[in-house]
Image: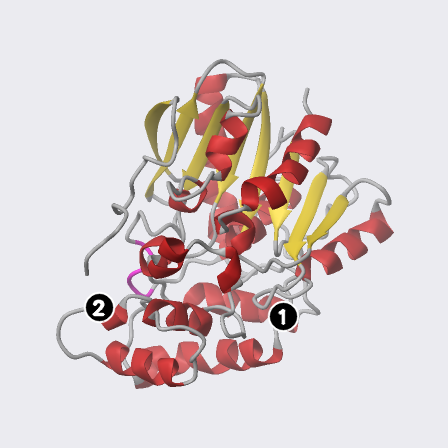
């Protein structure tokens, strides 16, 4: 496969000192953060990706990414977290038993602690996306993370909802993939891999149902996430090079996180603990709305109007929290956008980021 943009490039951020900050979790995984620092700032931003993506979705060189936008608009110390869902690490590429509880308990608190060792007691604001948003909100509302000044949560948080066909896939495919087809993980780049494999056959079958474009990785991503043609984004919102390099930007994933989402769907669309009897997870609540009244950190719940992955999940979360703590949190729905293109579209610096900046400025220390 010939790449147009280098894998894991940092060229999307200009005029910043970039440093790498590795850390170890309490369950012995090595994770990492990138820091983009232009000058000292009292309000520091931590950005968290979703399942199979990475820091790269916020530092893309083909458009003004979120990190560059924040640096250019007075938030001059920005960190991106690559936790265990990141395609910059290997942990998605084999069967495992990790759930979002493990991330809430081990990854996010240690990331914030690692930041504190560098920045001290300055304000931390979090922008989080997809299952990175679900797991971080679980960490925050489960009281594993404290001292966060504000949060912007995209697409889904503590009340996941998905389209009907997605429910069918979540119910059937993890079992079929692992136990019938012997597939360890789903790979959006199967079509480019050498030699024959079941994955290549599956990709070709999926492509038969996706005539909206000629990019096999895009077809696989619609199969892996959501229900739509395409599911993750609107084609017209992406630069064509972004569309073509989707396999690099998302990466592969094994099945267990899907199982945790399915369990939440069955619990009246509430975030609940995947393994409630596991003593390791005892510090976390079994139901992540348990402390909702006590969590004073303001949250901007955002979503695209055309979200074909988690539909109106964040609208529902805002509605439910409004009944508990009226007026504490905000909601914004972006017309013409979906699940992923609110960060990866080529005009997001005009259409999306000013609203995020407004919320961050409102909650500066």
Residue at (79% x, 51% y) in the render: 321
* Mark 1 element type: helix
Q: Quadrant of the C terminus?
A: top right
Q: Which residue is mark 1?
A: 265
Residue at (45% x, 31% y) in the render: 79
Residue at (36% x, 80% y) in the render: 207
For residue 41, say whether it is visible.
yes
Side of 68 where 24 appears, left or right: left
For residue 352, say whether it is visible.
no
- The verdict on residue 92 being magenta is yes
The image shows residue 273 at horizontal and vertical percentages of 58, 59
Residue at (32% x, 86% y) in the render: 180
Mark 2 crowdedness (10 Å alpha carbons): few <14, some 14-19, many ≥20: few
As drawn, which residue projects farthest toward the top? Answer: 40
As drawn, which residue projects farthest toward the left? Answer: 195
Q: Quadrant of the N terminus?
A: bottom left
Q: Which residue is mark 2?
A: 192
Q: CA distance from mark 2 to mark 1?
A: 34 Å
Q: Is residue 33 above or below residue 268?
A: above
The image shows residue 94 at horizontal and vertical percentages of 29, 63
* Mark 2 element type: helix
The image shows residue 89 at horizontal and vertical percentages of 30, 48
The magenta span reads: 91-95
């Amino acid at each position: 496969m010939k790449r147009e943009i280098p894998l894991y490039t940092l060229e999307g951020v200009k005029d910043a000192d970039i440093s790498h900050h590795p850390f170890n979790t309490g369950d012995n995984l090595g994770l990492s953060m990138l820091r983009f620092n232009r000058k000292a700032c009292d309000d520091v931003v931590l950005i968290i990706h979703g399942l199979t993506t990475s820091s790269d979705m916020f530092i893309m060189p083909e458009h003004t990414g979120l990190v560059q936008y924040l640096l250019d608009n007075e938030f001059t110390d920005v960190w991106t977290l690559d936790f265990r869902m990141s395609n910059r690490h290997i942990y998605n590429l084999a069967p495992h038993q990790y759930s979002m509880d493990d991330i809430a308990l081990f990854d996010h608190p240690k990331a914030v602690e690692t930041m504190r060792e560098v920045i001290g007691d300055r304000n931390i604001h979090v922008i989080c996306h997809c299952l990175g948003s679900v797991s971080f909100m679980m960490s925050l509302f489960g009281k594993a993370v404290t001292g966060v000044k504000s949060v912007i949560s995209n697409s889904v948080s503590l009340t996941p909802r998905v389209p009907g066909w997605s429910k069918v896939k979540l119910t059937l495919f993890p079992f079929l993939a692992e136990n019938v087809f012997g597939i360890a993980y789903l790979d959006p780049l199967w079509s480019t891999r050498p030699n024959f494999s079941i994955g290549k056959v599956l990709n070709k079958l999926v492509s038969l149902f996706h005539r909206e474009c000629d990019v096999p990785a895009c077809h696989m991503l619609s199969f892996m996430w959501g229900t739509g043609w395409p599911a993750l984004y609107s084609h017209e919102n992406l630069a064509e090079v972004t569309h073509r390099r989707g396999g690099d930007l998302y990466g592969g994933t094994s099945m267990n996180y899907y199982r945790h989402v399915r369990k939440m769907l069955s619990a009246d669309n509430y975030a609940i603990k995947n393994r409630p009897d596991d003593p390791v997870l005892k510090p976390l609540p079994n139901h992540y709305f348990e402390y909702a009244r006590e969590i004073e950190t303001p949250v901007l719940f955002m979503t695209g109007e055309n979200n074909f992955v988690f539909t109106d999940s964040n609208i529902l979360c805002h509605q439910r929290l409004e009944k508990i703590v009226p007026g504490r949190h905000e909601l914004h729905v972006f017309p013409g956008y979906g699940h992923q293109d609110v960060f990866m579209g080529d005009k997001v610096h005009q259409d999306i980021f000013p609203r995020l900046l407004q919320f961050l400025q409102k909650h500066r220390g």
